[in-house]
Amino acid sequence: MALATTILNTPFFLIGIIYLNSLELGWATTGVGFFMLCLSIPLWFYSQREARNRVPAMRSERREHGIFEPEPVPLED
């Protein structure tokens, strides 16, 4: 029930915010806001791909109880 309400109300919520923003500040700032939001979409896809590629790279002998332990870095004298 909550999912159906969310799906049905989201378009009305977005339309209301766009309308109020355009009345208060104008369409130019609304367009800039949408452009900035659209810039985050490729970044989200990139981060999803990086997270998916990192999981197979972890070697099983380095994992202990599901926690990744990085290799120790030697200290220089």
Image (cartoon, rainbow, N blue to C red):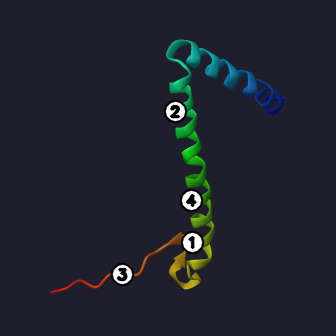
Residue to which mark 4 is pinned: 47
Residue in front for this viewpoint, 17 or 28: 28
Upstream in the sequence, badge 1 or badge 4?
4
Residue to which mark 2 is pinned: 32
Query: How many neighbours does mark 2 have within 10 angstroms: few (below 14), some (14-19), or many (20 or more)?
Result: few
How far from the left and from the top, in percent, is residue 33?
A: 53, 32
Amino acid at the residue labelled 2: Val
Name the quarter where the C terminus is drawn: bottom left
Camera-side mark, 3 or 4: 4
Q: Give the distance between the C-alpha atoms of the residues marked 1 and 3, in whole angstroms.
A: 19 Å
How far from the left and from the top, in percent, is residue 75?
A: 23, 83
Q: Which mark is residue 54?
A: 1
What's the residue at 56%, 82% (across, down)?
59
Please determine whether, in this image, residue 40 is positioned above or below residue 52.
Answer: above
Please determine whether, in this image, residue 55 is positioned above or below residue 3.
Answer: below
Amino acid at the residue labelled 1: Arg
Figure quadrant of residue 11? top right
Amino acid at the residue labelled 3: Pro
Upstream in the sequence, badge 3 or badge 4?
4
Upstream in the sequence, badge 1 or badge 3?
1
Query: How many neighbours does mark 3 have within 10 angstroms: few (below 14), some (14-19), or many (20 or more)?
Result: few
Q: Secondary structure at mark 3?
A: loop
Residue to which mark 3 is pinned: 72
What's the residue at 52%, 69% (across, down)?
67
- Residue 74 shown left or right of residue 18 in the figure: left
